[in-house]
Amino acid sequence: MKFREIFRFEFGYQARRVRTWLYFAVLFFVAYQLRRGGVHCLFTVTQETLLAGLLWILMAPAVAGSAAARDVQTRMHPLVYTTPISKADYLAGRFLAAYVLNALILLALPLGMLTALLFPGKEPEIIGLFPPIVYFGAYGVLALPTAFTFTAVEFSFAALKRRAVFSYLGVVLFCVMVATTAAVVTNVLRLPTLGTLLDPTVRIILVIVPETTLPEMNSVLLGLKSSILVNRLLWFGITLAMLAFTYRRFRFADHAVKTR
Amino acid sequence: MELQIRGVSKTYPKGVQALRDVTLTIPAGMYGLLGPNGAGKSTLMRMIATLQEPDTGTITLGPSTLLPAQGRPEEDRGATGSGPAIDVVRQKDEIRKTLGYLPQEFGVYPKATAESLLDHFAVLKGITARGERKEVVEALLRKTNLWDVRKQKLGGYSGVMRQRFGVAVALLGSPRLLIVDEPTAGLDPAERVRFLNLLSELGQNSVVLLSTHIVEDVSELCTRMAIIDRGEILLEAEPLGAVAELQGRIWRRVISTDALPELERTHAVISTKLYAGRTIAHVYCDSTPGAEFEPAKPDLEDVYFSAIAGRIGRRRERPASEGRS
């Protein structure tokens, strides 16, 4: 009951904010524009989903940051932390609300792209080749899992550092760390396969997709290509570990004073 | 029911000792914790409110030890009716079920309305039945005079309105332990009276601990009190009894301001006040300090300043310089 209430209130609070819808509108517009000018092939759909997804990474950490740190930043935390709620309900409710909000914001990508197809000038047979499932497939395989990892990074940094701005700094730090690790693994250790697995945004898919023939397209997008699946599983595991770490370190305490 | 604080000490990382071997027994009713700013009141309040832990010592909420069990009222036989004592430091989840806390400083979500946020807090405090929650929220919004502005966003509230909202949150679920930290600081006189009336209603069945640096808050409300300074309890008493004990020991003299240093050198001046450009000095003395002094009718302010100045209470038994070492 309390988990549900924490989720419900957080989701409702941010869903009523203009900022949330501004993010949606920007992504929708960008996706629409990209698709309007884009060539109709699987590669470009994937590329555009990734590109707009990167824009989301840079633009929207405030959603998770706010969910994680708003109590401390508004100084309402002494009131919240002294209610009989469990740390698990509190953190899980807030995190899930942030993730669902981000998932909805990212829904602007397939919706924006599909809207572009509705406008005159597009050949009906091309639309037939790219049914909506392709766009939602890219959303499900690329956008949603990536959002899970990045929401967790943003949420964890903000919750543990107790300031929403750390969601931005956390993303920057995380990207630098991951990029450095991937570069070292690929170029120094000469393990390019492992290196590509370490990219949480699965840019690897851009390498795979051009080689993909049309019959293989759906299986690629549905994540059945083994390297994508392994990448997703790897980052799912890393993300869960990160959330577990945040759970262990987080305290219902006033100021920086440690308490249980 | 009573709150027992035993040997609680706390030193902050930079070496500041916020609390020094604090021992208090706080029965049901209004209890005043009086002390100057920086005395350690808020640290103690945060500890009782589970937001901070003591380095040493225990804090428990349990059945009263002051009265024999048979003589106690029914609701007084345990912290939650009939349950065992709750260890505030180790059983945080348990104590939070019966805790109301109004911090000295707090904020609210600016974009939420008072009604929606109070309803949210009601669920967090365990009032899950929708009908009951609606009634509780409405009653509290009316009691705190926020009913007419319940649909307004909290970001537009004045400081006093926010304070009232904090009171409503603290009162949710009729807590058995209510911690109120400096609630009247910043309130205008009318608001202060209103607020104190609200608190006094609560003090009947719960342990209400009120921290303040305003002597009148305690004298008007509290049946028991403690005076705290530099992290240690100087005096634990009933306000009326403590005032009565000072009878015949407080003397008053009106002097010019520049004569004050000399008076302080020769007499135990506990407090001074300016009045019409002259200084009224209160002096503590067991017998008449001289013909130029007149006896003053002691009040709680004299108790407070006598304790701080080390004329009564623990600092008299053990001089302040020793306490500071």
Image (cartoon, helix red, strand yellow):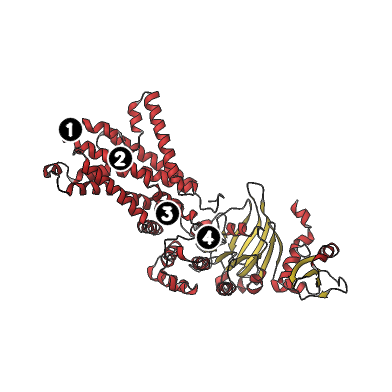
Q: Are marks 3 and 1 on the same chain?
A: yes
Q: Which residue is mark 2?
A: A51
In depth, the one of B273 and A137 nearer the eye is: B273
In depth, the one of B273 and B1 nearer the eye is: B273
Q: Are marks 2 and 3 in contact (CB under 8 Å)?
A: no
Residue A29 image position (x, y, % from top left):
27, 48
Q: Chain of mark 3?
A: A
Q: Chain of mark 4?
A: B
Q: Which residue is mark 4?
A: B106
Q: Earlier in the sequence, mark 3 or mark 1?
A: 3
Q: Chain of mark 2?
A: A
Distance, label 2 to label 4, CA atoms, is 42 Å
Under mark 2, the amino acid is Leu
Q: Are marks 2 and 3 on the same chain?
A: yes
Under mark 4, the amino acid is Phe
Under mark 3, the amino acid is Asp
Q: Which residue is mark 1?
A: A213
A228 vs A65, left or right, is: left
Q: Earlier in the sequence, mark 2 or mark 1?
A: 2
Q: Nearer the viewer, mark 2 or mark 1?
A: 2
Under mark 1, the amino acid is Thr
Q: Nearer the viewer, mark 2 or mark 4?
A: 2
Name the element at disc 4.
loop
Residue A87 image position (x, y, % from top left):
46, 52
